Image (cartoon, rainbow, N blue to C red):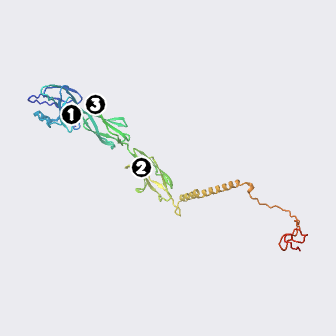
Amino acid sequence: MQKKGFVLGFIFLFFVLLIGSTILPAKAEVQSKTLLPNQYWGLGTDLDSGDTLYFQITSPSIGVNIYIMNDTQMSIYQNNPQDLATNYIYQWTGYYLLTYSFMAPDNQHYWVLIINPNDSLSTYVTIDAYIVKSLTITSPTTIDTILPGYFYITWTSTGDISRVNIELYKAGMFLETISFFDFNDGSCLWSISDDQYEDGSYYQIKIIDYYDDSIYDYTNYFTIETETKTITITSPTSTDTFLPGHNYITWTTTGSIDYVRIRLYDGSYFLETIESSAYNDGSYDWYLSSYDTYDGSNYRIEISDYDDNLVYTFSNYFSIEIEQGSNGASDVHIQIIFWNVLLFIIIPVAVILAIAVVLIHRRRRQIPEEIIPITREISVKEEPVKSQERELPKITYCSLCGTEILDKTGGFCSKCGASIK
């Protein structure tokens, strides 16, 4: 970074031009000068690309012309004061009050040129000018993850900043000073050792102007991972024998490990992945079926960090025993079938029958006794039936007209008069 050195530039010209020059201060500092007719006042300083020059000019009596020039343009002007058509970077003409900030496009020496254009009147001019100081951290950024080793902290600055302090924060809380009274050269080599910091994503770097703590900058949050990551399997051990059913694989870890991968080996020969992404809670329930064909004492479990295959470990050798019966099914499998039949067939049928019996019994209790048919033998005494025959009167009809003859003493039909025999 270019050192800020303020250069005094005086060139005396001929004719009516009185030449004066002043350096620009690093901090705000009011300077004043009386400009005679056609006199100029040049203030020059070195600026790096991105440096911002702030100035305020007051002319209480008559307007002045203000120009921003580089050294080449200033030299042309000094040799030919009339050549100002395009011989400048910026200009403001006839201003009584000017507040302006100029950002240098590149690393050069620049001039603020103030001219009294009046041929007969003098003017009293004041200038409050300084280079705006700033610090901007460029590394680390929010996407960076800092690991044990070395890391370059980098930044840019404007203005006259010669020394800086560099500090480390976590979640807004100060942790330590990384570098004290460091040269403002734009970079600092940061050494990080194993387990130096707690792993996390809320770290920040702060850089401060050593001589002016109001000038500083923070990074966004970034991540540090310095904790040593290890995995230690606690089960199975060399004395363990896994059988059909539930078997627990257990382990401990250090460092930031979110998920693990669990694999089974026969010696050094990979057999299968038991779990490709198990949550790192220190335990996994591995169910061995009686159909599995494992049998021996040369098995090993491997557990590795899901996100970093370089972090892994193996268990000691252990045994797996799954004995097969003569019919191809193990005793455990037969027991499982028995209990499944008992649980899902025999017990439900027994429950259904019991419910049916209870319902029938309750139904019978609800039928009234008077409508329940009761069959029993009743003895009956036999008695002779008395005859109740009686003689019916004889009815006589007329043989000619069929009319019933009521009066049989007359000898004739009362209707047709025929003789009754």
Marking on residue 212: 3
Q: Secondary structure at mark 1?
A: loop
Mark 1 surroundings: few (<14), some (14-19) or many (≥20) residues within 10 A: some
Q: From the viewer's perspective, is residue 123 above or below residue 317?
A: above
Name which quarter of the figure residue 184 lies in: top left
Tell me residue 251's x, y (percent). 44, 47
Nearer the camera: disc 3 or disc 2: 3
Q: Quadrant of the C terminus?
A: bottom right
Q: Say what amino acid the circle numbered 2 marks.
A: Val
Which residue sits at x=64%, y=55%?
355
Q: From the viewer's perspective, is residue 301 above or below residue 413?
A: above
Name which quarter of the figure residue 107 lies in: top left
Q: Secondary structure at mark 2?
A: strand
Tell me residue 412's x, y (percent). 88, 72
Which residue is the site of mark 2? Answer: 260
Q: Quadrant of the N terminus?
A: top left
Left or right, residue 3 beside residue 349: left
Left or right, residue 257 beside residue 79: right
The one of 310 and 381 positioned closer to us in this rendering: 381
The one of 62 and 29 positioned closer to us in this rendering: 62
Specify which label sits upstream in the sequence, 3 or 1.
1
Residue 179 in view of the camera: no
The one of 112 and 165 positioned closer to us in this rendering: 112
Q: Say what amino acid the circle numbered 3 marks.
A: Asp
Which residue sits at x=74%, y=54%?
369
Which residue is the site of mark 1? Answer: 4
